[in-house]
Image (cartoon, rainbow, N blue to C red):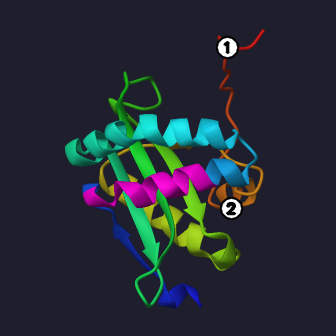
Amino acid sequence: MTQAEVTIREATPAESVIILHQRRSMFRDMGEGTVEELDRMAEVASPWLARALAEGSYHHWLALDATGRVVGGGGVLLCPWPANPKDPCTERAVILNVYTEPEFRKRGIARQIMLTILAWAKELGLRSVNLHASDEGRPLYEKLGFKATNEMRLRFDEP
């Protein structure tokens, strides 16, 4: 399968199960979470995802092969955010759930998904997008121009 044989289209709220499969598989492939934790994540995320897709605060694109099989996807969460001196926008876009089924990796599918997402965000008038990169995804994001930032995190459930 070549890039030309892949179609990218926006997911519908009815395709939440596919998106949750991709999110769960993404974390599984990164070695994050037990089976029970991944199951709980999908269960908790399901009503949120259906609502976010329906109201438009989350958008997801699916990559399909020539037979219509979903082989990858990726999404954007739009969040209200105060403007700052370098960015007058009052929304922030966070790219999430970029995933390609293992047997279809290294064929440019994630790149096509990302280019679709980036074009959509630019058309929306956003000035930037953020994401958290897996070790496997980092080279793609760097090639697309993403830079590491000064973000920090504090977890309340760790000593």
Up-down relation of residue 158 to residue 125 (above or below): above
Up-down relation of residue 17 to residue 154 (above or below): below
x, y (%) of residue 30? 73, 49
Residue in view at x 37 percent, y 44 percent: 126
- Depth check, mark 2 against mark 1: the one in front is 1
Mark 1 surroundings within 10 Å by alpha-carbon count, few (fewer than 14), some (14 through 19), many (20 or more)? few
Spatial CA span between label 2 and label 1: 31 Å
In the drawing, does residue 65 fall left or right of residue 25?
A: left
Query: In the depicted view, which residue is nearer to us: 38 or 116?
Result: 38
Q: Which residue is mark 2?
A: 140
Q: Which residues are magenta?
A: 14-25
Mark 2 or mark 1: which comes first in sequence? 2
Q: Main secondary structure of the magenta part?
A: helix
In the drawing, does residue 134 fall left or right of residue 121?
A: right
What amino acid is at disc 2? Answer: Leu
x, y (%) of residue 2? 59, 90
